[in-house]
Amino acid sequence: GVLRQDLVDGHRLAQPRPPSEEVLSRLHARDDILSVKVWRRDGVLAWTDTDPTRIGRRYPVEHHLAEALEGNGEAELENLGGEAEHSGELRAGIERALEVYAPVRSDDGKRIVGALEVYADARPLEEAVAVRRNEIWLVIGLVFLGLCAALALLARQASNTLRRQTRMLKEHSAALEESYD
């Protein structure tokens, strides 16, 4: 939404040019967005807000980018490695991010003219996952305790039943012995 008007020119990705100050200020106003890349269909980096020296370079079109260029959005929590494509993000201090790929469509929406790659702050997601993980472990612990309590109750009832049946068997045995005598 922030870059769309500057990205597409009819049925093609617009010529790489620096986005307007308005676009950059809206982009940088988002604390959750760490970095943005705009890709052409042929794997050329058309624009990025980190390390613009990479603009115009061709990189391999790998899995997630290929999926976005086919029209499918993708997202992944990513540890940014030493690949040349991530060099600008690593120099900017971005080591782990939620990497989101989205297709960029032509003005009429029928053709895919490129793709966006957005690196979002992963901390809120990681914190939510940590909270959910703790909740899951708490629930697992409570279920385990409940099962242990149910098993203990079942064992106690079974033990009481066996004691009662043993007592009754002894009484019947004693009665039979007395009758036999």
Image (cartoon, rainbow, N blue to C red):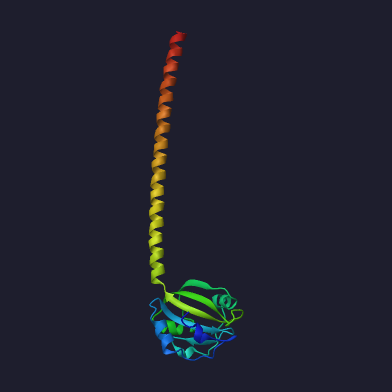
Q: Is residue 127 visible?
A: yes
Nearest the viewer among 21 and 119 is 21
- Residue found at x 47% / y 78%: 118
The quadrant of the image that shows the C terminus is top left
Q: Residue furthest top?
A: 181
Nearest the viewer among 143 and 7 is 7
User: Residue 40: image x %, image y %?
Assistant: 56, 85
User: Residue 86: image x %, image y %?
Assistant: 47, 82
Nearest the viewer among 109 and 142 is 109
User: Residue 60: image x %, image y %?
Assistant: 56, 82
In the image, residue 63 above or below residue 148: below
Give left or right: position of 72 versus 32.
right
- Residue found at x 57% / y 73%: 72
Q: Is residue 92 visible?
A: no
- Residue found at x 41% / y 48%: 143
Q: Residue furthest front?
A: 108
Q: How many marks?
A: 0
